[in-house]
């Protein structure tokens, strides 16, 4: 049996993190859980320690973003894990999800990573079955579709990082996440590097439920800034054509949406992200 370590990144969110941990501890395929805390309040950390004495807690003492939190957990387990499962704390795994993902990875060593079908929490609609490129931007594949995925398949472009099982040997070969991105599109950038090395990226017939931006807030100023900045940085690495489309099409679409809703403050934050993306200014800046 392969050794699986699940890395759950937490920041001041006990309830969602607890539900995620419960679902991981109840898997048909055993996995060891490591909670990486990105500088939460002491009360939240101690509450998690009391409820889950069997779970390893890795306290960073500061917010290093999703990429930094994942990397800290990966570094702690990489030499003793066959597979590393990274997870948002607002994801709930169906009981056989890890077993199905490991089974898929065992079929072909060229699969660097896989993700389950991610459905909305409390809803049968699909949120993500991988990603695909649309007008120069990675969008969620099969989003809002009411379909059942009967067989596993290669993702059209990349994977989403809210629930992603990665082969440890691939991590050592491809490298870890780019911490300078801080949050958003760190998994996209990793998937691009993995594909360039000839690896496959799979979407498997397993299901998790995602509360969708319970931690960050959908279309919050932070979300808008980091998505704008980081996709331009990542797209430039993917090639000139990708960067051109990323620079023109996606900003026009988002700005049209924000102008219609008269969200002046968010427009400023988004444009700030675009400018910083063009200038390749990385790190925590929002």
Image (tube, helix red, strand yellow):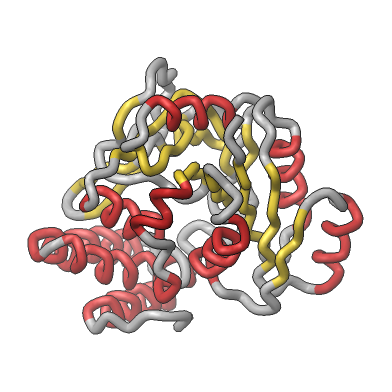
Most foreground residue, 232 or 116: 116
**Residue 236 in the image: x percent, y percent?**
19, 68
Reply above or below: 232 against 202.
below
- Please determine whether, in this image, residue 102 is positioned above or below residue 170: above
Query: Is residue 264 in view from this perspective?
Result: no
Whether 68 is drawn above or below 279: the answer is above
Residue plotted at (65% across, 78% down): 62
Q: Quadrant of the N terminus?
A: top right
Left or right of 10 in this view: 171 = left
Residue 266 lies, in percent from the top left, at 42, 73
Residue 221, horizontal then vertical, whole percent: 47, 71
Residue at x-position 78% and y-position 51%: 55
Q: Residue at x 24, y 84 (%)?
A: 279
Q: Specify whether residue 110 is in view.
A: yes
- Quadrant position of residue 39: bottom right
- Residue lying farthest top? 150
Residue 6: horizontal and vertical position, in percent?
Answer: 62, 47
Tell me the quarter of the picture where residue 32 sits.
top right
């Amino acid at each position: 049996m392969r050794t699986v370590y699940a890395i759950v990144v937490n920041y001041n969110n006990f309830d969602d993190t607890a539900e995620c941990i419960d679902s991981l501890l109840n898997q048909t395929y055993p996995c060891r859980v490591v909670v990486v805390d990105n500088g939460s309040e002491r009360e939240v950390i101690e509450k998690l320690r009391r409820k889950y004495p069997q779970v390893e807690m890795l306290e960073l003492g500061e917010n290093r973003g999703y990429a930094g939190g994942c990397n800290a957990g990966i570094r702690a387990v990489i030499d003793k894990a066959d597979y590393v499962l990274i997870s948002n704390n607002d994801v709930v795994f169906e009981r056989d999800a890890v077993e199905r993902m490991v089974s898929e990875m065992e079929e072909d060593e060229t699969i660097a990573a896989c993700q389950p079908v991610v459905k909305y929490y409390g809803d049968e609609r699909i949120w993500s079955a991988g990603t695909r490129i649309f007008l120069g931007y990675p969008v969620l594949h099969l989003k809002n579709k009411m379909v059942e995925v009967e067989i596993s398949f290669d993702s059209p472009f990349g994977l989403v990082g809210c629930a992603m099982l990665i082969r440890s040997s691939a991590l050592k070969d491809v490298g870890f996440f780019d911490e300078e991105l801080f949050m958003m599109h760190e998994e996209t950038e990793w998937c691009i590097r993995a594909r360039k090395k000839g690896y496959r990226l799979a979407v498997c017939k397993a299901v998790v439920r995602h509360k969708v931006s319970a931690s960050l807030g959908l279309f919050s100023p932070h979300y808008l800034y980091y998505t704008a900045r980081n996709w331009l940085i990542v797209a430039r690495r993917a090639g000139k054509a990708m960067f051109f489309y990323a620079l023109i099409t996606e900003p026009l679409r988002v700005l049209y949406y924000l102008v219609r809703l008269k969200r002046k403050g968010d427009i400023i934050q988004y444009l700030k992200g675009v400018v910083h993306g063009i200038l390749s200014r990385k790190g925590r800046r929002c």
